[in-house]
Image (tube, rainbow, N blue to C red):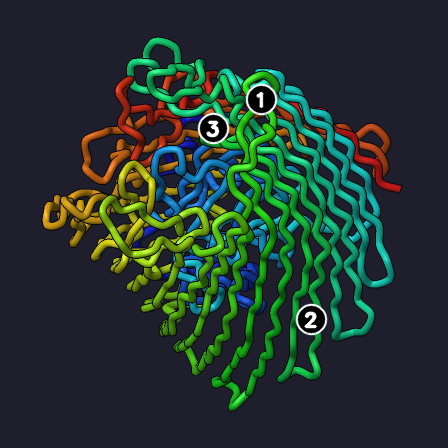
């Protein structure tokens, strides 16, 4: 067994550099004389993705796109989106306290933050979708309240600049589907228990409806938490109706709701982390009152109704459209202020597609579409009652915050023989509205707009191996919590509610890569998928914090260069090896801090961070997973996974280091038939951090420097366990 495993890994590494992967190795057959002759067999992979706004084969798209392997969805912990993304190159998902809150970045986008504003409870720079409905708000922020990780049936990730298709998404796209992969009737009931009080009950039921299906998904999760003040609970439900009212028409309707509460333990100084990584931030010399004293937390209630429609008029023309409306009630105890948000969010899109078959070898595809998102509502700020730790009676602010994202795009794809050329153009305008009912003189609006081009080329080296290159623009506007204005000492200019120093982040991504798949039934390595990409990203107008995050402004220029590799191979002995690695170098090219933004008397005094690395972005991370599916026992499997992340800086000045780490995880599971074809039992046991390593799982970026020290460390979970028992009934 060990010898064959070594051979398996060696074969994988040996064949990867060759551009003929996509061709199956010759299969031996006997001729009339009994001698064996070689025949070549090709297999067209059925890997079709929809995250590019139309269904297309993943190999033919000049972008880096990953479909998350099903084994990841099967064995992930299911509490936090970071667990979905461990095997996606270029993507970093970090659990912030072992619960719902996660930090997600793609090629460095999504990494920024500032002290207590370090993206707690939200992500930015990356667009998230569930069943085609946007989770991301018009300003680019995303909360994870409605993303179902337990019943995710498919996850697609665009790891490249996707702004020309989606707008305001320099980092890429994460698209999650909850639609069951099969139409047949079934009901799954699962119960999970785990370390630190983790308890989850979940139900997924599905039934055919005509040519479509209907399903209901419910999960109820609660955890006591490992660190002090890190408990959480979430109830999430979806009713989905997938209809085929006509042969060329698809209509999907989704009703989704959630109640989600999680506590925030805050960051620790290095000294606190060494002494007791389990504690919350409770040092009053750093924060007064502390995270524990104010019971810092988020309590969110949301409900959404969404629909997607797709209709093909004929083989050449079709349309698709999406519409949704959402209500949000969000309560936060944050920075010694109780914040009540009551918001409504609605939007949709419409896309027209046309395909012209010009000859047997040549065709042209056109996409034309537009998007609209609008969010508005009241924001009330109160004091935090020191006794109840809930909303106090003193109203500090009474505001209205609105944002609208309006955009349109056109894309043309010309295919002739082995060559494909894609060109696209998109215009986006994001408008903010700020209205203050206590200080109306600060009322203002601001609009950020940008025209974004892209071009990509794909060349088929072999039937299942494609070489591609692309150049694309990206835009990312300041998030709503980054638009607060500076309070400049000595300034006579009237303060407005929106920061006049901000501009959109504009990026250009240059990318080349090769991706392919090969397979044969007779060889030791039966299937091999691979994806290698190299990129260079130039970013103008990076948004950075000033004065410990009191406000933000834009600086000159930064750049990122990287190489990514993702591969998965399966053998004839039931082994699957999956690898994801990322190497990246970052640098601020132009970054000057002008103290005149804080106090007019300091005008002319400045500090340059040019040449520094960008904070929050490690130069290396890798995941390796080895799975064994027992050949003679269907449904029995075991996995082991290694994750490694290099050190990185937590601040733009490059003075605070977040130490690198490596962890091991293992899982074993089985599906046991009870009544043939009708009732089965499934069990799963997973252990994370097998070696019980103490590590810095995440960090607050550009942390506050206080008299009591610099708190920035979010402790990683020690060794922890989760076990799941499930029953599936099939009529």
| Front position among marks 2 and 1 | 1
Q: Looking at the image, which residue is at 86% across and 31% down? A: 675
- Residue in the picture at 33% in, 16% down: 285
Disc 1 secondary structure class: loop
**Can see residue 459?**
no
Separation of residues labelled 2 and 3 (CA atoms): 48 Å
Mark closest to the chain's N terminus, 2 or 3: 2
**10 Å neighbourhood of mark 2: few (<14), some, or many (≥20)?**
some
Q: Earlier in the sequence, mark 2 or mark 1?
A: 2
Residue at screen point 39% across, 31% down: 643
Using the image, tell me which numbered label, if any, was put on residue 336: 3
The residues bearing labels 2 and 1 have C-alpha atoms spaced at a distance of 49 Å
Q: Give the residue displayed 42% in from the left and 53% down from the top.
A: 497
**CA gap, disc 1 to disc 3?**
10 Å
The residue that mark 1 highlights is 389
Q: Where is residue 242 in the image (x, y as percent from the top left)?
A: 77, 59
Q: Can see residue 104?
A: yes
Q: Nearer the viewer, residue 665 or 297?
A: 297
Question: Can you give x and y, in whole percent of width and height, for residue 207 in the image?
Answer: 84, 50
As helix, strand or loop, the secondary structure at mark 2 comes to strand
Number of numbered discs on residues = 3
Of residue 321 and residue 660, the one placed in the foreground of this image is 321
Residue at numbered disc 2:
310
In front: label 2 or label 3 = 3
Rendered view: 118 above or below 496: above
Badge 3 element = loop
């Amino acid at each position: 067994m060990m010898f064959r495993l070594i051979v398996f890994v060696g074969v994988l590494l040996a064949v990867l550099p060759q551009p003929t992967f996509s061709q199956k190795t010759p299969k031996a057959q006997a001729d009339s004389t009994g001698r064996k002759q070689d025949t070549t067999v090709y297999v067209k992979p059925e890997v079709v993705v929809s995250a590019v706004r139309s269904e297309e084969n993943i190999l033919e798209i000049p972008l880096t796109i990953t479909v998350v392997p099903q084994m990841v969805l099967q064995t992930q912990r299911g509490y936090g989106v970071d667990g979905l993304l461990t095997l996606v190159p270029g993507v970093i998902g970090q659990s912030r306290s072992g619960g719902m809150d996660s930090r997600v970045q793609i090629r460095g986008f999504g990494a920024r933050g500032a002290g207590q504003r370090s993206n707690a409870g939200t992500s930015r720079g990356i667009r998230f979708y569930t069943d085609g409905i946007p989770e991301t708000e018009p300003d680019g922020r995303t909360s994870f309240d409605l993303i179902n990780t337990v019943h995710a049936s498919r996850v697609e990730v665009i790891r490249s600049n996707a702004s020309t298709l989606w707008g305001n998404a320099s980092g890429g796209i994460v698209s999650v589907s909850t639609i069951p992969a099969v139409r047949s009737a079934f009901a799954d009931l699962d119960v999970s228990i785990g370390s630190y009080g983790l308890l989850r009950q979940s139900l997924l039921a599905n039934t055919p409806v005509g040519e479509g299906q209907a399903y209901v998904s419910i999960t109820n999760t609660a955890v006591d938490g490992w660190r002090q003040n890190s408990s959480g609970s979430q109830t999430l439900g979806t009713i989905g109706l997938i209809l085929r009212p006509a042969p060329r028409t698809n209509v999907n309707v989704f009703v989704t709701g959630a109640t989600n509460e999680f506590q925030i333990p805050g960051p620790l100084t290095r000294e606190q982390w060494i002494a007791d990584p389990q504690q919350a931030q409770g040092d009053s010399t750093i924060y007064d009152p502390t995270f524990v004293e104010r019971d810092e937390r988020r309590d969110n209630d949301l409900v959404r109704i969404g629909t997607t429609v797709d209709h093909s008029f004929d083989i050449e023309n079709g349309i698709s459209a999406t519409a949704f409306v959402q209500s949000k009630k969000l309560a936060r105890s944050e920075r010694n202020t109780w914040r009540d948000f009551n918001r409504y969010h609605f939007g949709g899109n419409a896309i027209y597609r046309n395909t012209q078959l010009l000859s047997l070898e040549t065709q042209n595809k056109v996409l034309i579409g537009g998007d609209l998102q609008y969010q508005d509502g009241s924001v009330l700020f109160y004091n935090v009652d020191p006794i109840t730790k809930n909303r106090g009676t003193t109203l500090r602010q009474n505001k209205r915050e609105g944002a609208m994202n309006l955009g349109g795009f056109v894309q043309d794809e010309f295919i002739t023989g082995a060559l494909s050329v894609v060109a696209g153009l998109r215009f986006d305008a994001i408008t903010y509205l700020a209205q203050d009912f206590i200080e109306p003189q600060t009322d203002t609006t601001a609009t950020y707009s940008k025209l974004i081009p892209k071009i990509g080329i794909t060349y088929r080296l072999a039937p299942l191996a494609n070489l591609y290159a692309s150049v694309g623009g990206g835009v990312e506007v300041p998030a709503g919590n980054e638009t607060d204005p500076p309070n400049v000492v000595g300034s006579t200019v009237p303060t407005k509610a929106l920061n006049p120093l901000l501009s959109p982040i504009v990026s250009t991504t240059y990318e080349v890569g090769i991706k392919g798949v090969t397979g044969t039934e007779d060889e030791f390595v039966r299937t091999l998928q691979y994806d290698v990409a190299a990129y260079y990203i130039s970013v103008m107008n990076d948004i950075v914090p000033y004065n410990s995050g009191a406000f933000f402004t834009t600086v000159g220029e930064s750049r990122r260069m990287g190489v990514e590799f993702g591969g998965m191979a399966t053998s004839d002995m039931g082994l699957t090896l999956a690898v994801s690695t990322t190497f990246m170098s970052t640098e601020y090219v132009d970054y000057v801090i002008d103290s005149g933004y804080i106090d007019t008397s300091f005008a002319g005094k400045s500090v340059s961070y040019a040449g520094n690395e960008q904070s929050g972005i490690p130069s290396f991370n890798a995941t390796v997973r080895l799975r064994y599916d027992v050949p003679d026992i269907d449904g029995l499997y075991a996995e082991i996974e290694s994750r490694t992340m290099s050190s990185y800086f937590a601040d733009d000045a490059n003075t605070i280091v977040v130490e690198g780490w490596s962890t091991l995880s293992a899982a074993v599971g089985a599906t046991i038939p009870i009544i043939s074809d009708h009732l089965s039992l499934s069990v799963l046991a997973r252990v994370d951090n097998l070696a019980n390593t103490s590590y810095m799982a995440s960090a607050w970026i550009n942390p506050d420097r206080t008299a009591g020290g610099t708190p920035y460390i979010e402790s990683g979970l020690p060794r922890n366990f989760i076990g799941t028992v499930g029953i599936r009934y099939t009529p």
